[in-house]
Image (cartoon, rainbow, N blue to C red):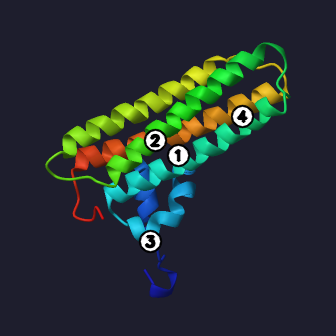
Amino acid sequence: MHPQFALKIPELEVSPNKDACSVTRYRALCINTLAPFSTTAKTSPSKWARAGVSITIGETKKVTQYLMKVKNYRTMKGSYKIPLSDCIECLQDAIDQLHGSLGVLRKLNARNFYAQMGDITTWLSAVLTDQETCLDGFENPRGKQAKMVRNRVLRSSYFTSNALALVNKLAASGLDNTVA
């Protein structure tokens, strides 16, 4: 083949966040939200797990604040008032569990690593349960506001699912040398 007609195929370079997010269910969301961490996290599973949990905290707080505004402005009508209060309580509990998870991720050590991973996966699973409990109250939403509540809580559960996948990847890979 004549050199000028040879196809040049660019080398496929996988970005660190795409590699980290390969284990997640909601990859596009993971890749987009973790992109800012690519430079610092690089190939460190512990840093990716921390980033995933940190982002999940922020997202869950935003959803909780939104739900509190809906409750305080009394814009939620009828049969959704009680589920809304329950949902806020569930998400506040979820935020506590997420903070606990992040605290442990910041203090990982070789001696207690697997116990720490067990605690974190238990807490993140509990966060998913809290989010699912919240969603149960808005199972067949009628009205724009109820649908918005459901969609926001559902989206926050995608962040949690991704964070749990990143933590599971860390647990499977073991404690790396770039924990700090």
Residue at the spot of label 3: 39
Mark 1: secondary structure: helix
Kind of residue at badge 1: Thr
Q: Quadrant of the C terminus?
A: bottom left
Contact between marks 1 and 2 (CB within 8 A): the answer is yes
Mark 4: secondary structure: helix
Residue at the spot of label 2: 98
Contact between marks 2 and 4 (CB within 8 A): the answer is no
Up/down of 110 relative to 63, above or below? below
Q: Earlier in the sequence, mark 1 or mark 3?
A: 3
Q: Earlier in the sequence, mark 2 or mark 4?
A: 4
For the point 40% across and 42% down, the residue is 100
Q: Earlier in the sequence, mark 1 or mark 2?
A: 1
For this view, does 136 lie left or right of residue 79? left
Kind of residue at badge 2: Leu
Of the pair 89 and 178, the residue shown nearer to us: 89
Q: Residue 47: x percent and y percent?
A: 37, 59
Residue at the spot of label 4: 67
